[in-house]
Image (cartoon, helix red, strand yellow):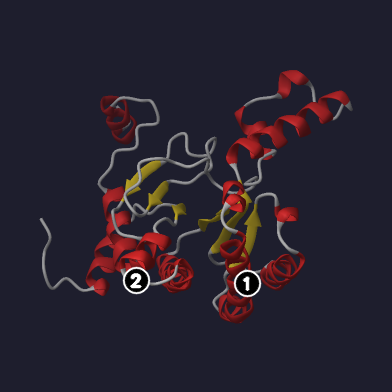
Amino acid sequence: MVIKDVTIDDLRKKILSKGIMPRHIAIIMDGNGRWARERGLPRVAGHNEGINSVREVTRECGELGIEVLTLYTFSVENWSRPKSEVSALMNLLLRTIRSEIDELHKNNVRFTMIGHLGDLPRAPLKGLMEGVEKTKHNTGLNLNLALSYGSRQEMIDAVQAIAKDVRDGQIDINEINDELFSDYLYTAGKPDPDLLIRTSGELRVSNFLLWQLAYTEIYVTPIYWPAFRAKELLDAIESYQKRERRFGRTSDQLNRKKTGK
């Protein structure tokens, strides 16, 4: 039941009072093109408006004390889109990081990237790397963009790197376990996502963080990404807080662990 006249501040206070916050939120930002088409606008208009959602969601995550926000910004499959759209996206990416990095730095946000970054055009990559360098010592929210990213390729890269280190005697084959494998992924050093949000209502994970999502809570909303703002983020977190995360255990086992009985 939706309660009317509840302000964002009220919802934020309610969420923070529960104390059960996700450390890492990952978002599949879907629906930019459909948002634009329904308004009779070119697809790039949806991407432009989506930047406003990124800005607001990033700010809200910082205020909530979220540790990591990973945004699925550009997948390896996206390179197959029309060249004009890809070029517009790359230019938008460069303009955005140049215009936003000072504000991110001022707010103690650490900016990082994961993916096959060498696939990016020289100018956007240079601008992005300058942002990474400028904010590398910041200790607040880690804003992590997945660019030219594909989870299957990420796992193949990890397997190849592990095989090389086994061959070179750097690790023993018997040392390979979940923890070691995670250390070879692009996300090494980051906690696995607690909450995955997908906008636009699509029910798939689209080759995104397949290893890392093993025990992640999934929240799907029909709202297109350009219309997803702080209120929608808070709704997703509130839904997350109502879930029981069992990690393969039963509810009785969790209750006994909590009570010590």
Checking the image for residue 91, the label placed there is 1
Which amino acid, by three-letter code, is at mark 1? Asn
Residue 205 drawn at (x, y percent): 45, 41
For the residue pair 243 and 103, the one nearer the viewer reads as 103
Number of marks: 2
Tag 1 near tag 2, CB within 8 Å: no
Checking the image for residue 40, the label placed there is 2
Drawn side of residue 223 relative to residue 27, left or right: left
Image point (47%, 73%), residue name: 48
Q: Quadrant of residue 225?
A: bottom left
Q: Quadrant of residue 88?
A: bottom right
For the residue pair 139 and 47, the one nearer the viewer reads as 47
Q: Is residue 114 visible?
A: yes
Drawn side of residue 192 relative to residue 227, left or right: right
Residue 218 drawn at (x, y percent): 36, 43
For the C terminus, the image quarter is top left
Image point (61%, 35%), residue name: 152
